[in-house]
Image (tube, coloured by chain):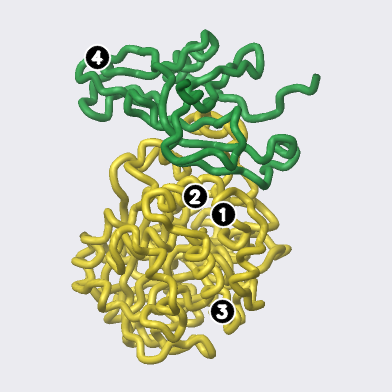
Chain colours: A yellow, B green
Amino acid sequence: MYALRDKYAIAGIGWTEFSKNSGRTVRSLASEACLKAIDDSGLKVADIDGFVSFNFNDSVPAISVATEIGVPAARYANDFLSGGNAANMIVLTAAAVIEAGLAETVLCYRAMNGRSGFRLGGGRDLSAHGITQFTAPFGWITYPQAMAMWCRRHMIEYGTNSEQLGELAVTFRSNAVNNERAMQRDPITMDDYRNSRMIVEPFRMLDICLETDGACAVLVTSAERARDLKRKPVYITGGAYGGGPNQGEDLFDAIRWPDQSHNYAKYIADDLWRSAGMGPSDIDIAQIYDCFTYSVLMQLEGLGFCKEGEGGPFVQGGRIARDGALPLNTAGGLLSEGYIHGLNHVIEAVQQLRGDAGARQVADIETCLTTAGAMTCGSAMVLRN
Amino acid sequence: MTPYNKPLPAENVETKPFWDACRQGKLSMQRCKQCGHHRFPPTFYCPKCNSPEHEWIDSKGLGSVFSWIVVRHPVPRDVYAADVPYVVALIALDEGVRIPSNIVGVEPEKVTAGMRVRVIFRQVTPEITLPLFEPVPEQQ
């Protein structure tokens, strides 16, 4: 269990433009986000001594970013081979690295040309080696196709329907309208959702997240040091990373997973809440990993915001809107803001907890949950101001 | 005839017996010699007892639909444009393992949860035969 409650903090954040075609190298995007996070914190490049990132499709090694921005001595630089499941884990890892004395000031980043370069949604390696020899030959190749199989299980078990999925898409878009970073800012209606093209049943186009060129970076240091820096610290109160039995042979594979009607969230819930000393009712707003609409339902259920199977009705009726009881994905999420593999959720959490979210600011908040991952493994954090 | 352009399984030392069996019209899986646990996909060690000792047994090829999707948008387009809509399913075999495959011989709209299916084999290249599934006909 994460045992560093409030001992470390996010002291700076940075991000690039989120676009469909950056016209730039991934390394330069990573460097831009990192330089902005350093500037935001009030520290200098020379103060940075650690990097943690993750890569799955497109990315650049941490040492290349350290090289480009001229970090004098990167004492810890680690690239995890991971997908969205890692977007909170790298922040927890940064805290652990500092606690261990391996570094003092760690940048966590994710950078990719996810639209103009390596499109994660556009298909995978078709060579059908390893575990994919049992999936790709049947035309089961893309992540929307993978997650649609999960969604159907929830529909079979609990009667979850497309109107409930649509509620998520429409609500998150309404949040993106007020977000200058967001790639999709035009409001949509339930009719727009119903009329959106069926890609892979049960998913329509509007159930599927965006593909984005861009980068995000988060600077982690001790809470004690963060209190002396330029910005209001956002404390890493609790966190957890993991999943259940049979997490599979890669991030696509869930052939042996117990049941696709639930995901990693139920397996990390106890660790998460015990580490934070809180429960779901203590959470003011949440940024839930939404590579697809459906993944949000499993996480709300798994983390205990509602009972298993009740995620569909839970998100209906305005509860998750910006003025609702539990505002979700206040920047628009991966569905409407952009897909920086979940690290953009952490950026939004920090902005909200600092009170810097402008027109989309949710008033009077002290806690924000962030999650990362959709399938058999994932990570989550409780952040507070 | 246009060459087969879809992904072909790249068998390895663990999976070769499975694909060899498919070529002979058999759906096979591993059974642990120590604890009797059935497992799929193939692995070197039994996840229940960690024994590497196993035998390959023939499945009856019968199961039910655990979950399914209907692919409408072809990816990659040039490979699957002529195939959509097609059904990919997770099939719960009666022996207690799940296997991904296609459901053929039925309109995609008629696939239902728990639908009984049986294996058929389709040779796609001289080397590769894929196990597909079709609905079990209703008993007369």
Q: Residue at x 27, y 72 (%)?
A: A280
Asked if marks 1 and 4 touch (Cβ < 8 Å), the reply is no
Which residue is tagged 4? B33
The label nearer to you, 1 versus 4, is: 1
The label nearer to you, 3 versus 4, is: 3
Residue A174 image label: 3
Where in the figure is residue A290, as x and y percent of width and height?
Answer: 48, 63
Lower position in the chain sequence, tag 2 or tag 3 = 2
Which residue is tagged 2? A147
Which residue is tagged 1? A203
Q: Residue at x 51, y 81 (%)?
A: A39
Near-viewer residue (A325 or A364): A325
Alpha-carbon distance for marks 1 and 4?
Answer: 42 Å
Alpha-carbon distance for marks 1 and 2?
Answer: 9 Å
Asked if marks 1 and 3 touch (Cβ < 8 Å), the reply is no
Q: Amino acid at mark 2?
A: Met
Q: Amino acid at mark 4?
A: Lys
Q: Amino acid at mark 1?
A: Phe
